[in-house]
Amino acid sequence: MPVLAGAQEQQAKVSVLPPGPTAPSWLVKTTPTKASLAKALALAEMLNSEALTRRQIARAYTDTMPKQIGQRPEFAEMERLYPGIVAAVIQAERDIVEPGTIAALPAMHKALSVVYADYLTETDLDAIIAFYGSDTGAKAIQAAAEGSDLGHMIDRNLSGQEPHVEVDDFRKTATGVGTKFIGSLTDDDRRKLIAFGLTPAGRKWQAIQPLMFKAAADQANQRNSGLNTQAADNVVNVMTDFIAKADAQKAKATGN
């Protein structure tokens, strides 16, 4: 069974505009300060918290993956022969991926904070942190947890493709999160969102999205290089043990 050790990290999307493929030409680097680096790290932790990450992982393994596996004849046949095996191997993968992803969060926070501090001033960071601390911003964070859809990554891995995280994976997921976020807003929320998006901080935040996605993808692939192997080994071990026990019980029941 292929492994989903893809990135679970998602930025809470706040713009009504879809993320672009590249950063705009007007975006220029700034000089990070000790204070801006600290605020950048705080923002990364705020938007990619352990609680948020665990909720995204839970959605992937308890909802999205079982549904997509259920649509594949090869897994349906395996489940017919060995009832319960699909749930067992999904859990076997999660047992490795979830703690590995959580353990790697500090490195992800650091990678994202470097991007923030390279392009956002202290004033920018204060404004963005304030937005996410507002009721409207809290809805964006909630949408990131509930609206992120890793289905395209799961389908790719179930098809036997190499589990590699692409920048476009984040762009697709962020677009889905943005749609859910916009749909959850009141008229007052939308006014606040538009007002924030027109500020210098809001414009820069939108502009650095492609750079954030690249940093997150690079970090995820670095993490996954060993995690994929561990998860695959655990899946194989659990499948082998499950089949052996099921066959032994069947043999005992039939007297063979």
Image: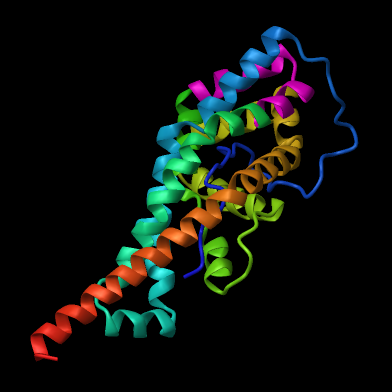
Q: Is residue 201 left or right of residue 68?
A: right
Q: Above or below — where is 182 with respect to 88?
A: above
Quadrant of residue 207 in the image?
top right
Q: Above or below — where is 183 with respect to 88?
A: above
Q: List x then y, in percent, for residue 106.
A: 55, 28
Q: Is residue 178 visible?
A: yes
Q: In which quadrant will I find the C terminus?
A: bottom left
Q: List x then y, in percent, for residue 14.
A: 60, 36
Q: State the extent of the magenta-drawn residues as a range.
A: 112-133
Q: Is residue 46 left or right of residue 117?
A: left
Q: List x then y, in percent, for residue 61.
A: 39, 57
What residue sits 29% from the left and 76% below the top? 243
Quadrant of residue 145 in the image?
top left
In-front residue for pair 228/201: 228
Q: Above or below — where is 161 with respect to 119?
A: below
What residue sits 60% from the left and 34% below the top? 108
> In the image as oriented, which residue stretches furthest toward the front?
256
Q: Is residue 126 visible?
A: no
Q: List x then y, in percent, for residue 149.
A: 50, 55
Quadrant of residue 236 in the image?
bottom left
In-front residue for pair 12/98: 98
**Residue 120 on the magenta span:** yes
Q: Is residue 202 left or right of residue 44?
A: right
What residue sits 52% from the left and 63% below the top? 154
